[in-house]
Image (tube, grey):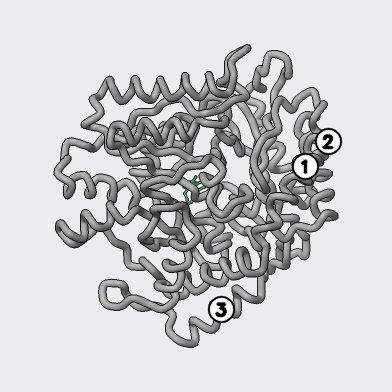
């Protein structure tokens, strides 16, 4: 009997023994093509020798030093590098151990910034329905994922949730992308007016929505309009690039493709690529300096902030992504993956939508393509697809509740950037089989 408190308390999963490139192997020797990098983590695949060598070298120097006493060379170098490649204006980096921590730091930084900027009345967060920002209480409250929030609702701070930018279901018949974006931004503006702009601290969103919607990018112009509203009201724009960042969508930061920069940005997952647990919160000089010139201390912190070994790993991941051209593979590979998905599922009677950017693609499963009616949630179609794919030796990331937190099913794909054409064929083939088995 396993003593590990597993995600599923009734059944323990198989045990992984090793990883190599795009594959993971369990202790029975079975191979799994890692078509979702777990949850959009393993952007370099498994066993990258450059990254493992960098970790070993750092361990030989010093594994850990507490940031209350000492900074470290890997943290300094990584921060310099991230600032150099980040959207304009993001100039300071706060290193944490994952995505939820990055979002908690973002929320608390926004709050402390306004206190120190002499606007202590700003405390309300506006976020979007059908979003996920992490499982710690602040991040969970901010997320608009109904089923994840429900059991913990009494513990969550009050957050406003407006509509996501979800063209497949949200855009009306005959509406243009511009009209849809304008309607969504009018809804945001109305929410701001209802509470008073002077009480709003931040608007929080995932540039390309990951786990909750299945790789849904915004329509053209949406984020430029959101940025304008935030600027006009002095509201901070916090972008959660935990899943869609670090090259996943074809640019290092997803928001580059929307032509905007946030005031605060959260990254994780692909930053450490699974080699070490690491996340980061990046912010503007204005936010940092307001605190530096005010109290002088961001009243936050964790034991493992700026962990030197984790930072060394992330530095090596960036070497691979940027210097070795691995990130540059995403746009062409993403195009090829999308073509294959369209070939395989474009006419499928139960695939309503194929969407995404780069190597971040999703398919939405529907009972009826014409009406977009989802399947009965009681069928747990997403869980069946996951099980059938896993059985066939494919790891992908299906999820339910796509429509409203209850109804709807999608499958998220986020394969490693080192994927070969043959592996891509295998991925789409196994996914196709899994969908048929699950529907069967
Ligand atoms: N934000 C987004 C967009 C995510 O997808 C996730 C995780 O899936 C998180 C935050 C939380 O990250 P973590 O699980 O590393 O705490």
Hey, which quadrant is residue 297 in on the image? bottom left
Residue at the extreme bottom of the image, as rendered: 60
In the picture, the quarter occupied by the N terminus is bottom right
The mark lying in front, picked from 3 and 1, is 3
Q: Earlier in the sequence, mark 3 or mark 1?
A: 3
Q: In the shown orientation, is residue 267 left or right of residue 153? A: right
Q: In the shown orientation, is residue 191 left or right of residue 277? A: left
For the point 56% across and 27% down, the residue is 166
- Seen in the picture, residue 413 relative to 1 is either above or below; the reply is above
Q: Is residue 83 visible?
A: yes
**Residue 431: mark:** 1
Hey, which quadrant is residue 129 in on the image? top left
| Residue sitting nearer the eye, 394 or 151 | 394
Q: Around disc 1, counting alpha carbons within 10 Å, would you say few (fewer than 14), some (14 to 19), or many (20 or more)?
A: many
Distance from label 1 to label 2 (Cα)?
10 Å
Distance from label 2 to label 3 (Cα)?
40 Å
Q: Secondary structure at mark 1?
A: helix
**Residue 107: mark:** none
In the rendered structure, are the residues bearing label 1 and label 2 in contact, judged by CB atoms less than 8 Å apart? yes
- Seen in the picture, residue 80 relative to 341 is either above or below; the reply is below
Q: Which residue is mark 2?
A: 344
**Cβ of mark 2 under 8 A from ligand 1:** no
Q: Position of residue 250 (x, y in %)?
A: 63, 50
For the point 72% across and 67% down, the residue is 20
Q: Is residue 101 visible?
A: no
Q: In the shown orientation, is residue 338 left or right of residue 130? A: right
For the point 67% across and 22% down, the residue is 375
For the point 39% across and 43% down, the residue is 238
Distance from label 3 to label 1 (Cα)?
35 Å
Q: Which residue is mark 3?
A: 54
- Seen in the picture, residue 213 relative to 337 is either above or below; the reply is above
Q: Secondary structure at mark 2?
A: helix
């Amino acid at each position: 009997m396993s003593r590990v408190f597993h995600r599923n308390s009734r059944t323990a999963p198989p045990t992984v023994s090793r990883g190599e490139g795009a594959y993971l192997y369990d202790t029975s020797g079975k191979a799994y093509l890692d078509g979702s990098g777990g949850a959009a983590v393993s952007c370099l695949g498994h066993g990258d020798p450059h990254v493992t060598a960098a970790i070993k070298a750092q361990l030989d120097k010093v594994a850990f030093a507490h940031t209350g006493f000492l900074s470290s060379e890997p943290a300094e170098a990584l921060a310099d590098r991230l600032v150099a490649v980040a959207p304009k204006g993001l100039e300071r980096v706060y290193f944490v151990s994952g995505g939820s921590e990055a979002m908690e730091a973002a929320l608390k930084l926004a709050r402390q910034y306004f206190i120190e900027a002499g606007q202590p009345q700003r405390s309300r967060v506006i976020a979007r329905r059908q979003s996920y920002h992490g499982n710690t209480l602040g991040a969970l409250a901010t997320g608009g994922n109904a089923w994840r929030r429900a059991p913990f609702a009494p513990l969550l701070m009050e957050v406003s949730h407006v509509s996501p930018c979800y063209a497949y279901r949200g855009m009306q018949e005959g509406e243009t992308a511009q009209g849809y974006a304008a309607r969504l931004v009018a809804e945001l503006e109305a929410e701001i007016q209802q509470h008073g702009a002077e009480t709003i601290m931040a608007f929080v969103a995932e540039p390309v929505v990951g786990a909750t919607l299945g790789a849904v990018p915004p329509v053209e112009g949406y984020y430029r309009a959101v940025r304008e509203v935030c600027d006009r009201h002095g509201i901070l724009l916090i972008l959660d690039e935990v899943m869609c960042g670090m090259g996943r969508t074809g640019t290092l930061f997803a928001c580059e493709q929307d032509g905007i920069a946030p005031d605060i940005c959260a990254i994780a997952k692909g930053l450490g690529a699974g080699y070490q647990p690491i996340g980061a919160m990046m912010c503007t000089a204005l936010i940092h300096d307001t605190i530096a010139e005010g109290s002088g201390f961001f009243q936050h912190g964790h034991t493992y902030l700026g962990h030197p070994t984790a930072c060394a790993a992330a530095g090596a991941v960036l070497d691979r992504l940027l210097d070795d051209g691995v990130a540059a593979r995403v746009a062409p590979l993403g195009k090829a993956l999308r073509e294959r998905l369209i070939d395989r599922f474009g006419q499928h009677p139960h695939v309503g939508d194929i969407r995404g950017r780069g190597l971040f693609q999703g398919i939405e499963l529907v009972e009826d393509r014409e009406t977009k009616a989802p399947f009965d949630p009681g069928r747990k179609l997403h869980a069946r697809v996951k099980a059938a794919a896993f059985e066939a030796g494919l790891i992908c990331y299906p999820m339910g509740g796509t429509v409203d937190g209850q109804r709807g099913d999608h499958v998220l794909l986020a394969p490693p950037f080192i994927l070969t054409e043959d592996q891509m064929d295998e991925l789409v083939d196994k996914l196709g089989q899994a969908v048929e088995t699950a529907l069967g």
